[in-house]
Amino acid sequence: MKLPSQVTLALCLLSIKLWAQTPVAGIVNDEGGNPIPYATVEVLNTSRAAVADENGRFEMELPEGNYKLSAQAIGFAKKIQDLQVPARNVYETISIQIVLKERSTTLDEVVVTAQKTEQNIIDAPLAVTLISSKKVEDTRTWDLSTLNGLVPNYQYQELGIAFQQVQSIRGIQVFSENPAVATYVDGVNQLDILANGFQLNDIERIEVLRGPQGTIFGRNAMGGVINIITKEPTNQASSFFEASIGNLGLQRYGIGVKAPLVEDKLFFGVNGLFQRREGFQRVDTTRIEGAGGPVPGADIQGERVGDQDSYYGNLYLKWLPSVTFDATLNLKVQTDISDASSYFVAVDGEERARANPNTIFLSRIGNHERNVLNSALSLNYYTQNFTLSSITTYQKVGLSYEDIESGGIFHSIDGTRIGGMADPQEVYSQEFRISSNDTRSRLNYTGGAYAFLQDAFEPTTNLANEVGPGSYGIFRNKGTNSGIAFFGQASYQLTRKLEITGGLRYDYEDREATFNGSGFDFTTGEILFDLRLDNGVLTENRADTTVSGDYSALSPKLSITYQVNARSNIYLGYMRGFRAGGINAQRLPGGLDQTFDPEFSDNYELGFKTNLWGNRAYLAATAFYIQWDDLQFFNLVAPPFTFTRENVGDATSWGIELEGSVLPFKNIQVDVSFGFNETEYDDFSLTRVDAETLEQVISPIGGNRLSNAPRTTLYLAAQYDLPISDKIRFRVRGEFRNIGSYFTDIQNDLEQESYSLASGRVGFEFPQASLYFWGQNLNDERYIAFGAPDTSFNRSTRMSTPRTYGLTLTTRF
């Protein structure tokens, strides 16, 4: 059918109006009017970006609309500047001048993606800590443990290795395969803690969202979100090499290259890292058993435990075929290998651990290997009024281990091969999202759908338990989990100064677990395994059991923001988060529920953010109250030895948080963060068993403080830059952390008293290189790095790493 000529003409005119581009010509200068070469200028929430030439000039084309430009250059603070591209019949070039100030005289204007759109941190109605690429380097943030104190009311612990970690925000935490704090790495959700522990290399920024974030981020964002973003390639070719050496056998080498393959169209980036670190603990085999005598394994007396080599690689491909579409492929791989593993290794008893912080009591030294693949494909289609996005991710995690001593001797198993690579965990996810980008409208929105499929093989329930020479009890547990979610969030500007934001998310999950187990013969005292491996022969005494369950959750959000002035906002908000329910992968007596429900946290928050003194100071203050409902915890359900995870009770958490940065004088910056957190378990009890009488014991929990929730956190840092010449700067930085007292266990019986850490860095900055000597925990404080979460079972304790120091050389081209 042929369209009438009038209709054809109308469609052509509409197309021209929608896609017509206005040339924009700009220049980036310093305050003295001097051009800044090679500055980067990005248009927020679009794929548009430009790199200034040697004269500070740049060009781009934009359709009609209101935009925010983000400009930055080496040695200058990032600036956000508005740009209006008006409608016009004859397109003329729009000129714009961007004036950047030196970093020594002003702070960066910070951009975050906490609500999955790029915005100034002042405008985001939630508590978020931004750790920029510069701050990552200044604080030597190589892993998430550095966030202790740096982020108010944040606590990090790990059981020997980074993929067995506990992250706590505002007291909300758990030691489980399903974390209470969600960690994202370039858009990939680390659904299981086994996927955590990526080496931090070539980082653009780390955003820590404090408080529940269920509406936008979904499952397991009950305490908050750690959002890690690495640097993308641009039109400007660049490369770096970094080498670090230090005590405890530290060797760390990183290298990276980013370049345009086709200017303005196709960009490539690759970086890699190798890190070797020796453990600080030595084996002592002289424990006394029974009437006396050393444990087996005297040949390992004095051997070192905790060594690990890590290999990391990251590949970026970004394609911009047109101004309305972009595609980004990101691949990350990491392998962690140890022949002196500290995986799940701890000392039984905190007093013994404190008295021997560099000693571990073992009869064997284990090994482990973990392999992680993270991949993400991001597609964006831009129109004048909205952006359509697709994020497809795939993650694969494999783990093998052997001779791990933790209340027994455990190994991974592949078929009948002891110590073999167990079945991998695999996660597929897909998110479709639509976001408004018309800054002229009073209404802005984000909405979409999310789905995932997970094949889960949790390592502590897929293993071989050594019971004698050549004999093992085999445990296996395969989980098949899937879920779908629909979410939406909208902000409406009621007046020039008043904005209201509301959102809602619905999550539905289906879980299935196929597992075996064991029993106990009270006559012989023998453990009866459903599956045994004896001298290479598998014997199945009982078939596996399959259990399924489904769960749903609603996560609403509501906030109202008042703009005090152009650089200050105050907000009042409510947010909800949840942690997924699950299946107890063990056989239970008839009538007992194999499943447990999700747990929820409701957060009420009042916040204030401002830039002061001509952007030489930044201040953020937050007060919060959290109601945590339906906590999941292990409880005795069938005496004497049947414990399962149940929804046991509720808890509350409230407190305040302060963050600030100030440049009191040129070349001097001071950073501070402070958190106060008062927590309490509500009135509930846990059921346990007396080890001697095998009788039930009721353990009241109500009134106890939440575990791993320091009452206070404090961070103070000062940095001074001294220009030695036009091209050389001397820099010195000092840091002080204080972590208030807390209990690691729900019974409030294993306490870590308040402790302080001093760290520093001193060195030189050159035009294309830097050289620094650094030290962490310079006062050599030894504190509990991990303590048992439930001391009715054991008092496992692992002490912190001693003083570390080293030298880092970085070159940039």
Image (cartoon, grey):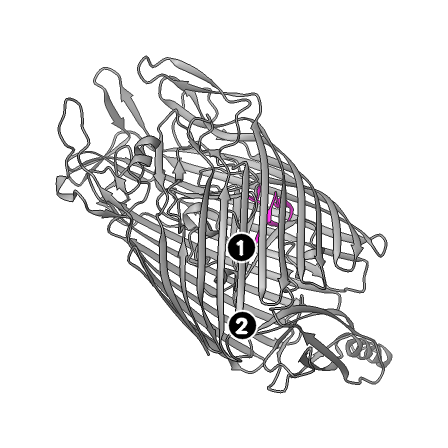
Disc 1: which residue: 717
State which quadrant residue 668 falls in. Answer: bottom right
Q: Indicate whether 412 appears above or below 567.
A: above
- Disc marking residue 33: none
The residues colored magenta run 207-222
Quarter of the view holding residue 140: bottom left
Q: Amino acid at mark 1?
A: Ala
Magenta run includes residue 217? yes
Q: Is residue 739 visible?
A: yes
Q: Are marks 2 and 1 in contact (CB under 8 Å)?
A: no
Q: Residue 293: give x, y in percent of width and height.
A: 13, 28
Identify whether 262 is placed above or below 599: below
Residue occupying image coordinates x 15% and y 39%: 297
Residue position for label 2: 318
| Image-quadrant location for residue 806 | bottom left
Circle 1: is it few (<14), some (14-19), or many (20+) Cα within 10 Å?
Answer: many
Quote the CA–CA distance across marks 2 and 1.
Answer: 37 Å
Q: Nearer the viewer, residue 151 or 213?
A: 151
- How many numbered discs sit on the rendered protein? 2
| Residue 397 percent coordinates (x, y) | 39, 52
Front of the two marks 2 and 1: 1
User: In what quadrant of the picture does the N terminus appear?
Assistant: bottom right
Q: Say if residue 187 shows up in the picture.
A: no
Mark with earlier residue (2, 1) = 2
Q: Percent from the top left, x then y, of residue 5? A: 84, 81
Give the left or right position of residue 716, taking residue 116 as reference: left
Check disc 2 and report its element: helix, strand or loop. strand
- Secondary structure at badge 1 equals strand
Label 2 is placed on what type of residue? Lys
The picture places residue 685, in percent across and down from the top left corner, at 50, 20
At label 2, counting other C-alpha atoms closer than 10 Å, the crowd grade (few under 14, some 14-19, many 20 or more) is many
**Is residue 514 a member of the stretch shown in magenta?**
no
